[in-house]
Amino acid sequence: MADHHNNTPFLLERKDVVFVKPAKPTLFEVLSLSSIDNDPNLELLCQSIYVYQAKPKPIFSNGNARHHDDVASKVNSQEADSSDPTHVIKDAISKVLVHYYPLAGKLKRESDGRLQLTCNGDGVPFLEATANCQLSSLNYLDGVDVEIAKQFVFDLPSKSEYGYHPLVFQLTKFSCGGFTIGMGLSHSVCDGFGASQFFRAMAEFASGKSEPTVKPVWERERLVGKAIQEPLPPIVDNAGLAKSPYLPTTDILHACFNVTSESIRRLKVNLMKELCEENEGKRESFTTLEVLGAYIWRSRFRAFNLNPDGKTILFLTIGIRHLLNPSLPVGYYGNAISSSIVELMGGDLNEGPLSGAIKLIKESKKLACNSDHVWSRINIIETLIEKKIKIEGGRGAVMVLTDWRQLGLLEEVDFGWKAAVNIIPVPWKMFGYVDLCIFLPPFSLDPSMKGGVRVLVSLPKAVMPKFKEEMDALLKLGDEEAHP
């Protein structure tokens, strides 16, 4: 578990909110969204924080002090704008909004239960803040307490007739010269892939490009399903779900657990031994997502103390951009996600071999990648919208797993301060917090985590100690006394 750095006192000075508008005039139009976009469970502002270190100071070789001062003064005057992250980021937002102009508008759910986005060029709320501490004193937000992290993001509720802002920014500068970008983006408008596409385009404009490498594509009509006329199949059979003595509760803790590459390797080695015995030497391969996902799923079951004669369900988020025929166009930045679904009786998950759960996850991924299956899920979402049915979460027996490691948000996004050293999502109130689990790339300044995975969870306070015990067992895997 990442250490929490809560004891560094600091003051945060916030300026007034300004609105960053597109750099050029854009279309005024009203856009509809896809069936997936319209899913009520996705209607929330997903807030994430990107952490950037200070630029290295220029080094002068001439020994003359006055020459140093003259050159430094010249460099400072010529590069004042490019050295100020506020100027750079605001300018990049303004330019990128010309291409992503819907994000400068307003989003609203109408009386028919569907969202519409009014492109009126109102602009994006932008808040500049200054913290009187160094980023290193907060360990670049790795393992930072959620209440501290919330100070680096903001939301601006709107009472406009057109709805609310789908995109907001907070830029926080630190005394060391580093800064954070807190981005809040409506999940109804973009999925993780779309958000990363937009963020990378911002960085391209900051670096001097005049056009984004990937041209954005709206075309949400491509993913509009047809409502099912016959009786709707149950999405989640609540009556048969396992129950936890710790729910319901509002006493929720958020934690990020570090899983090293060595722990993952040992888990896979133990799994291979288990499978070789079952398959008489026949080898199978499994991904880190499948293996670690199964382990976390079982760990949550044990920590929640769910009844073994009830069902538990794993929803694994998968991208569908290339699964459809025809494929979605390059540049599509709306929600293009579906889920593979695995159901197991609690006793089988808890007491059976972990390899059994992993095999089911792998098989469910194959089924979910079928185009017919994808469209059946979209049609179900469309039916739920038409009937105004929202699937409620927060029961503990369901786990929704999403993987951010392949979004390229650390190594590929450079605004002129090199790549971000950290990215953290501020916990989202999706599915009552407790159902959601996010796999994150490792903190880049921690060499011990190279190739590892950070696991972000939100759990009842009473559940967290047992879950931590399960995660500690994973880190000790391979020791004589530890077992998977």
Image (tube, rainbow, N blue to C red):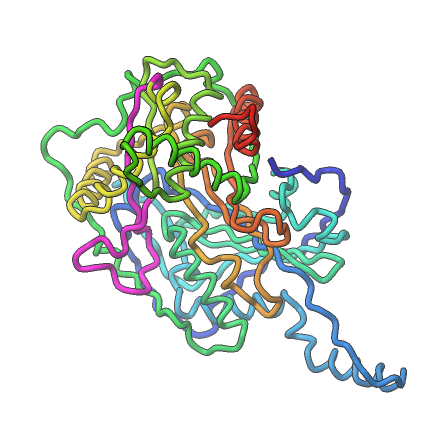
Give the vertical position of 238 relative to 317 (above or below).
Answer: above
Counting from the top left corner in percent of width and height, residue 292 is at 43, 37
**Residue 113 is drawn in which quadrant?**
top left
Q: Which residue is drawn at 55% across and 49% down?
A: 442
Furthest-left residue in view? 230
Q: Is residue 339 magenta?
A: yes
Give the vertical position of 237 relative to 370 (above or below).
Answer: above
| Left or right for 139, reference 316 | right
**Residue 383 is drawn in which quadrant?**
top left
Counting from the top left corner in percent of width and height, residue 57 is at 74, 71
Q: Is residue 127 at least partly visible in the picture?
A: no
| Left or right for 313, reference 260 | left
Number of numbered discs: 0
Give the vertical position of 96 relative to 475 (above or below).
Answer: below
Furthest-front residue in view? 281
Comparing 81 with 443, the one in front is: 443
Q: Image quadrant for the N terminus?
A: top right
Q: Does the magenta stretch include residue 227?
A: no
Comparing 170 with 191, the one in front is: 191
The region drawn magenta spans 318-347
Give the vertical position of 458 relative to 90 (above or below).
Answer: above
Q: Which residue is drawn at 46% across and 29% down?
A: 434
Q: Residue at x 31, y 30 (%)?
A: 391
Q: Is residue 404 at least partly visible in the picture?
A: yes
Q: Which residue is drawn at 61% across and 55% down?
A: 51
| Left or right for 169, reference 136 | left
Counting from the top left corner in percent of width and height, residue 400 is at 38, 35
**Residue 310 is drawn in which quadrant?**
top left
Counting from the top left corner in percent of width and height, residue 401 is at 40, 38
